[in-house]
Amino acid sequence: DAGVTQSPTHLIKTRGQQVTLRCSPKSGHDTVSWYQQALGQGPQFIFQYYEEEERQRGNFPDRFSGHQFPNYSSELNVNALLLGDSALYLCASSRTGNTIYFGEGSWLTVV
Amino acid sequence: QKEVEQNSGPLSVPEGAIASLNCTYSDRVSQSFFWYRQYSGKSPELIMSIYSNGDKEDGRFTAQLNKASQYVSLLIRDSQPSDSATYLCAVNEAAGNKLTFGGGTRVLVKP
């Protein structure tokens, strides 16, 4: 049983560019959340998708957007990248009310 | 603003000793509590979950929850060098699977 898978694992972008990160949830999971973890800090909640709708959102600007597909996979898009967007982006999947599992993350470096 | 506070450490313990980690949270309606272990450069890995007051033991790990005092702790018995990592405390609010993390406590186990 595959766990939560994310791609790409590492990427480097230039300020002002746009990036798309992808996530496939664990089998049987219908809820996908995205977190940003800056170096030396705990993960911060970006938003959560359930039934292809954004259900909750953290304190992140509109440059951060997402999507969930009918197969429950999800994308995180970040526009107009800033140096401060450099972080580990974590996808987490769950079934409502159950344990949350994290993927291995996508390391984004903005130069 | 819901907050989860942890001592950043590092907490240095000799091999074989007990490591004691503490976490406090501000939101009284929080329902479930988690400890994640994160090795450098890796994603968080769930090691303990606790939902009701008291102690919960799993192998060398014991989680303790006191909702009245709004704290949760983690004890690591017989600490091993492989336990050297950052330990993240996370709190799940009452509505939805959204985790609020503390900043993490770095633990160093010295042989």
Image (cartoon, coloured by chain):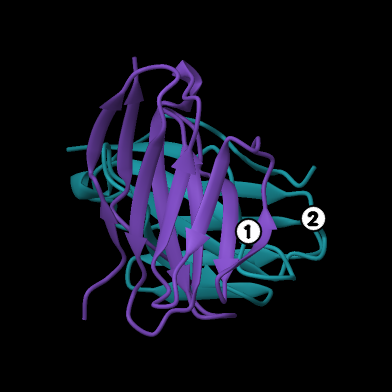
Residue located 36% across and 47% down the image: A21
Q: Chain of mark 2?
A: B
Figure quadrant of the N terminus of chain A: bottom left
Place of residue A74 in the rendered image (x, y in percent of width and height, measured from the top left): 42, 62
Distance from disc 2 to disc 1, alpha carbons, whole Å, reads 9 Å
Q: In the drawing, does residue B67 fall left or right of residue B62?
A: right
Farthest residue, direction left: B111
How many circles with numbers are drawn on the protein?
A: 2
Place of residue A56 in the rendered image (x, y in percent of width and height, measured from the top left): 68, 59
Q: Which chain is purple?
A: A
Q: In the drawing, does residue B43 fall left or right of residue A66?
A: left
Q: First in sequence: mark 2 or mark 1?
A: 2
Q: Amino acid at mark 2?
A: Asp
Which image quadrant is residue B86 in?
top left
- The colour assigned to chain B within the rendered structure: cyan
Are the residues flagged by discs 2 and 1 in contact, CB closer than 8 Å? Answer: yes
The answer to whether any part of residue B18 appears in the image is no
Of B84 and B29, nearer the camera is: B29
Q: Amino acid at mark 1?
A: Val
Of B86 and B80, nearer the camera is: B86
The answer to whether any part of residue B31 appears in the image is yes
Q: Is residue A87 above or below residue B4?
A: above
Q: Chain of mark 1?
A: B
Circles 2 and 1 on the same subunit: yes
- Secondary structure beneath disc 1? strand
Place of residue B73 in the rendered image (x, y in percent of width and height, measured from the top left): 57, 56
Q: Which residue is disc 2 drawn over?
A: B27
Q: Which mark is residue B91?
A: 1
